């Protein structure tokens, strides 16, 4: 994967620095909230997070749920519940689901609140570090939930070192990740899925190949949506011929009656990204169990 290879060259220094900063800040926080893209809840996660945060409680924010398949999102919530991890769907475009965030944190960290009370620190706010790989909507989340409420620079550890703290209410403070997190870029499928959603630029990827790979997944799980969008299709065709058939239906024909597959590929990816084909999730919890 072109972009993946590029990121490998770009990341090592950043990765080491981010790891170090997260380790440093860990003793100051009570939990981690990981923002993931609900359309690709596996590929949009940081592969090293579990090891990085150790035993800190984790809350998963399934963002962009407005574009995901809600039944699959429900499957992921149940999947994480079984693992003792709280996951909630959110949509930072409209703000849907965000009102549940505070209560979710307080419920997930009830033990911690109790512990603070026992130690005579009843007013101590819970501190949650928000993490996420680029483009999952981490900034959108922080902007919406914190409404620009940056914490005052105080003389206490972790606040003055250029870290971005936000006051949500008297009981809750958020910290933006001190650094940039990375996806599992050595896995080709991950790079591909990030490219489908537009999280990774497809400029340097083979656009037709990308569209064919997307069609393979969509034919398997969302054939009905493809048919509704592009008309009757023969799903026994291979993905290249399927792409040609879709392009032809849209009149993307060049000399000799052949399909302009590049145009068709761009159109398919564009329509997938803009949710024109429907609400689609490319990774299912039942395949991950
Ligand atoms: P990041 O900090 O994790 O890198 O992500 P950021 O908030 O910048 O969001 C990346 C893109 O995803 C933005 O779109 C943002 O608007 C969009 N986005 C974030 N959350 C949601 C969501 O819940 N639903 C939908 N549909 N989109 C979401 P963009 O095209 O890069 O910018 P723009 O459209 O905001 O101009």
Image: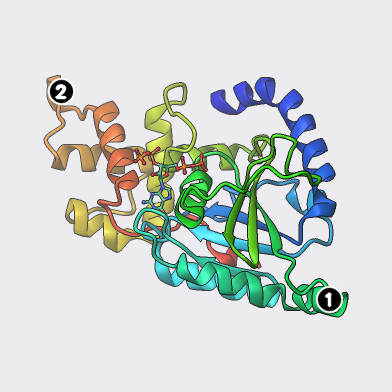
Left or right of 240? Residue 90 is: right
Q: Which image quadrant: the C terminus?
A: bottom right
Please tell me whether mark 2 or mark 1 is closer to you in this view.
Answer: 1
Seen in the picture, residue 149 relative to 204 is either above or below; the reply is: below
Q: Which tag, 2 or 1, sits closer to the chain's start? A: 1
Residue 3 in picture, x, y percent from top left? 55, 26
Q: Residue at x 44, y 52 (%)?
A: 217
Residue at mark 1: C-beta within 8 A of ligand 1:
no
Residue 87 in picture, x, y percent from top left? 59, 68
Does the rendering let one see residue 270? Answer: yes
Tags 2 and 1 in contact by the CB under 8 Å rule?
no
Tag 2 residue? 254
Foreground pick, 6 / 189 = 6
Badge 1 element: helix
Left or right of 28? Residue 203 is: left
Foreground pick, 288 / 19 = 19
Tag 1 residue? 115
Does the rendering let one see residue 38? Answer: no
Foreground pick, 204 / 150 = 150
Check the image and tell me how it is coloured: rainbow
Residue 106 in picture, x, y percent from top left? 65, 73
In this view, the residue farthest toward the right is 119
Q: Which image quadrant: the N terminus?
A: top right
Q: Residues within 10 Å of mark 1 (few under 14, many from 20)?
A: few
Seen in the picture, residue 175 relative to 257 is either above or below; the reply is: below
How far is mark 2 from mark 1, CA to CA?
A: 70 Å
Q: Which mark is residue 147?
A: none
Seen in the picture, residue 137 relative to 248 is either above or below; the reply is: below
């Amino acid at each position: 994967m072109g972009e993946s290879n590029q990121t490998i060259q770009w990341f090592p220094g950043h990765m080491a620095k981010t790891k170090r900063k997260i380790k440093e800040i860990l003793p100051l926080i009570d939990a981690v909230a990981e923002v993931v893209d609900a359309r690709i809840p596996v590929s949009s996660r940081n592969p090293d997070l579990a090891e990085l945060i150790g035993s800190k409680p984790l809350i998963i924010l399934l963002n962009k749920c407005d574009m995901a398949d809600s039944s699959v999102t429900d499957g992921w919530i149940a999947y994480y519940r079984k693992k003792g991890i709280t996951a909630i769907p959110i949509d930072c475009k409209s703000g849907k689901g965000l009102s549940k965030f505070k209560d979710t944190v307080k419920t997930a960290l009830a033990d911690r609140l109790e512990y603070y009370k026992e130690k005579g620190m009843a007013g101590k706010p819970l501190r949650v570090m928000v993490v996420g790989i680029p483009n999952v909507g981490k900034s959108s989340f922080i902007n919406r939930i914190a409404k620009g409420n940056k914490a005052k620079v105080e003389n206490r550890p972790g606040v003055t070192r250029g870290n971005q703290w936000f006051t949500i209410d008297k009981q809750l403070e958020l910290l933006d990740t001190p650094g940039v997190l990375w996806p599992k870029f050595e896995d080709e499928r991950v790079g591909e899925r990030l490219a489908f959603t537009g999280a990774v630029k497809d400029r340097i990827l083979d656009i037709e190949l990308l569209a064919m790979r997307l069609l393979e997944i969509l034919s398997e799980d969302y054939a009905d949506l493809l048919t509704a969008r592009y008309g009757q299709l023969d799903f026994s065709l291979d993905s290249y011929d399927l792409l040609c058939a879709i392009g032809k239906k849209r009149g993307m024909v060049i000399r000799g009656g052949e399909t302009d597959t590049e145009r068709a590929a761009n159109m398919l990816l564009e329509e997938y990204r803009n949710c024109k084909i429907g609400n689609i999730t490319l990774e299912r919890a039942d395949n991950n169990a």
